[in-house]
């Protein structure tokens, strides 16, 4: 599974994206956000920087009000941010 390959990537949950997070990707709204250096761009001489995936509860709940769909939407969002 993906968990073993994530290394030190933190996955956190916040209620809403803040203006700085929205501006960083030029979006009006976000379900999730990856912040960090993609593993494909790391080099042997570069010091690793912590990476973080943030999942935004509010937009996910509003877009998926039925509990049976919400779980799948959260999983889809996490997979999208990992990719």
Image: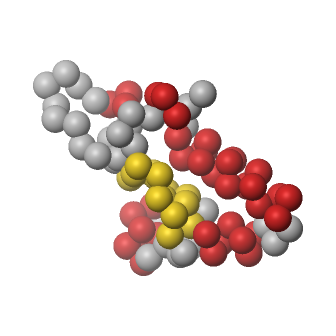
Q: Residue at x 61, y 62 (%)?
A: 31
Q: Is residue 16 left or right of residue 34?
A: right
Which of the image's four quarters has the N terminus? top right
One can see residue 8 in this view: yes
Q: Nearer the viewer, residue 75 or 42?
A: 75
Q: Residue at x 42, y 68 (%)?
A: 21
Q: Residue at x 69, y 47 (%)?
A: 76
Question: Residue 62 lies in what quarter of the image?
Answer: bottom right
Question: Residue 37 lies in what quarter of the image?
Answer: top left
Is 26 situated above or below 37?
below
Q: Residue 69, image x and y in percent?
A: 83, 58
Q: Is residue 65 left or right of residue 74?
A: right
One can see residue 30 in this view: no
Which of the image's four quarters has the C terminus? top right
Q: Residue 23, image x and y in percent?
A: 42, 70
Q: Residue 58, image x and y in percent?
A: 63, 75
Q: Is residue 19 left or right of residue 73?
A: left
What is the count of numbered marks? 0
Q: Residue at x 19, y 21 (%)?
A: 44
């Amino acid at each position: 599974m993906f968990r073993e390959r994530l290394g030190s990537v933190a996955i956190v949950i916040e209620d809403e994206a803040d203006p700085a997070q929205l501006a960083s990707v030029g979006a009006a709204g976000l379900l999730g956000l990856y912040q960090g250096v993609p593993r494909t761009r790391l080099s042997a001489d570069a010091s690793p920087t912590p990476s973080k995936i943030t999942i935004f509860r509010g937009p996910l709940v509003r877009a998926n009000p039925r509990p049976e769909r919400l779980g799948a939407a959260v999983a889809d969002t996490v997979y999208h941010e990992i990719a």
